[in-house]
């Protein structure tokens, strides 16, 4: 089997256009129907504004969703779209990516859709490294079904389904993706248009499975879940933005940073106490996922510290490239012979 060209970007083989596109070209004629104040509006606008920068033909872009509030997304994109089955969007998207290398395939899902009923499908799409992009809207609640706790709800969360508080320990979607050895993992806030766009652009250029977690507000059933990360007096001391090749430093005056700790761990420290030379310089291209995983463990359910940006961005042969190459090899070396198949040794007689 010929080696896969790992230098190919995520958009290789997808038809481009010389037509000048704007965000308006990606807005469908459907009325956008989310609750007033929903973070989905912000993400939709960011994606519609970002898509023209790819220079792709709209008929070669497809958005696949499962079930949930976020899963209405394909209706509002003037591209191809599939509103599919609860939790199964990654599987359907995998089929598209394998059969149609000329498509840019995007999955839109929520924390319930992706991490509960769809958890199995998500982790296998990531470990296979299928060339598709997964946008995981995380609002820490079930919105469409009216406010039950979700796989990312905080411990003790009081909801309609947990009136005395949730007993479940929540998933960390970034850690989960890295545990499945996803080759691209990022996180952004719905309100951070610049940061979200940068992560989306990098994800689009990546060849392989790219998971982008987006913290997104649900104003009806979990309003203000991420307000502390948007508050002017709090966000600078809580948000830890990642920039490749730069020391991980944050705070109102850059007085905090990330240093190595213990058995391969990372922790937050005052720069004045540890020295700038001891700060970790961010490198998402490190092949071993241990470093990226340690980054994902900084902070906790209370959002005391929250890392944003690109955690991991490495290259590995993609499932869809290898599957197509395997078929090509089989056709060249083993011509189809129906009679040989029928007369093969894997037969039996029923009496």
Image (cartoon, rainbow, N blue to C red):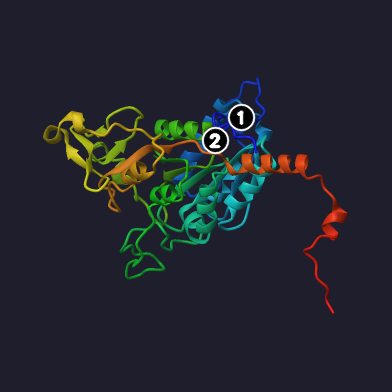
Q: Residue at x 30, y 28 (%)?
A: 246
Q: Secondary structure at mark 2?
A: loop
Question: From this viewpoint, which residue is outermost toward the right?
Answer: 339
- Residue 293 percent coordinates (x, y): 35, 46
Can the viewer see residue 31 in this picture? Answer: no
Q: Residue at x 55, y 32 (%)?
A: 6
Which residue, given by chain and number where applicable, does mark 2 sit on? Answer: 207
> Which quadrant is the N terminus positioned in?
top right
- Residue 349 percent coordinates (x, y): 83, 73
Give residue 291's quadrant in the image. Answer: top left
**Relative to 13, does residue 20 appear above or below in the rendering?**
above
Q: Residue at x 34, y 34 (%)?
A: 242
Q: Secondary structure at mark 1?
A: loop
Give residue 7's quadrant in the image. Answer: top right
Indicate left or right for 203 with 100 as reference.
left
Q: How many marks?
A: 2
Can the viewer see residue 106 in this picture? Answer: yes
- Residue 130 percent coordinates (x, y): 57, 44
Q: Does the residue at mark 2 contact the one at mark 1 (Cβ under 8 Å)?
A: yes
Question: From this viewpoint, which residue is outermost toward the left?
Answer: 273
Which residue, given by chain and number where applicable, does mark 1 sit on? Answer: 12
User: Quick one: 116 or 31, which is closer to the camera?
Assistant: 116
Q: Residue at x 60, y 46 (%)?
A: 64
> Which quadrant is the C terminus positioned in?
bottom right
Question: From this viewpoint, which residue is outermost toward the bottom?
Answer: 351
- Residue 288 percent coordinates (x, y): 39, 41
Please tell me which of labels 2 and 1 falls first in the chain.
1
User: Quick one: 235 or 327, which is closer to the camera?
Assistant: 327
Indicate left or right for 18 with 161 as reference.
right
């Amino acid at each position: 089997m010929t080696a896969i060209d790992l230098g190919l970007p995520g958009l290789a083989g997808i038809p481009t256009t010389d037509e000048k596109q704007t965000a308006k070209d990606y807005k469908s004629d459907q009325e956008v129907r989310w609750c007033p104040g929903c973070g989905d509006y912000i993400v939709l606008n960011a994606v519609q504004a970002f898509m023209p920068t790819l220079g792709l033909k709209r008929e070669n872009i497809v958005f696949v969703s499962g079930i949930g509030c976020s899963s209405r997304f394909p209706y509002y994109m003037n591209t191809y779209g599939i509103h599919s089955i609860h939790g199964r969007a990654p599987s359907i998207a995998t089929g598209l990516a394998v059969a149609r290398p000329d498509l840019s395939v995007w999955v839109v899902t929520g924390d319930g859709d992706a991490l509960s009923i769809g958890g199995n499908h998500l982790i296998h799409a990531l470990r296979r490294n299928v060339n598709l992009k997964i946008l995981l809207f995380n609002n820490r609640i079930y919105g469409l079904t009216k406010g039950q706790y979700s796989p990312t709800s905080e411990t003790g969360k009081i909801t309609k389904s947990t009136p005395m508080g949730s007993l479940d320990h929540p998933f960390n979607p970034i850690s989960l993706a890295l545990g499945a050895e996803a080759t691209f993992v990022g996180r952004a806030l719905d309100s951070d248009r610049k940061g979200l766009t940068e992560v989306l652009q990098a994800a689009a250029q990546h060849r392989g499975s790219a998971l982008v977690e987006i913290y997104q507000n649900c104003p009806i059933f979990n309003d203000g879940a991420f307000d502390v990360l948007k508050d002017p007096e709090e966000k600078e001391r809580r948000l830890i933005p990642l920039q490749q090749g730069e020391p991980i430093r944050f705070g109102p005056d850059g007085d905090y940073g990330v240093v190595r700790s213990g058995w391969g761990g990372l922790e937050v420290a005052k720069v004045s106490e540890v020295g700038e030379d001891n700060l970790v310089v961010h490198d998402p291209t490190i092949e071993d996922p241990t470093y990226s995983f340690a980054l994902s463990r900084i902070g906790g359910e209370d959002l005391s510290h929250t890392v944003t940006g690109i955690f991991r961005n490495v290259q590995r042969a993609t499932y869809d490239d290898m599957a197509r190459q395997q078929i090509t090899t089989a056709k060249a070396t083993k011509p189809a012979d129906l009679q040989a198949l029928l007369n093969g040794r894997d037969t039996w007689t029923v009496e």
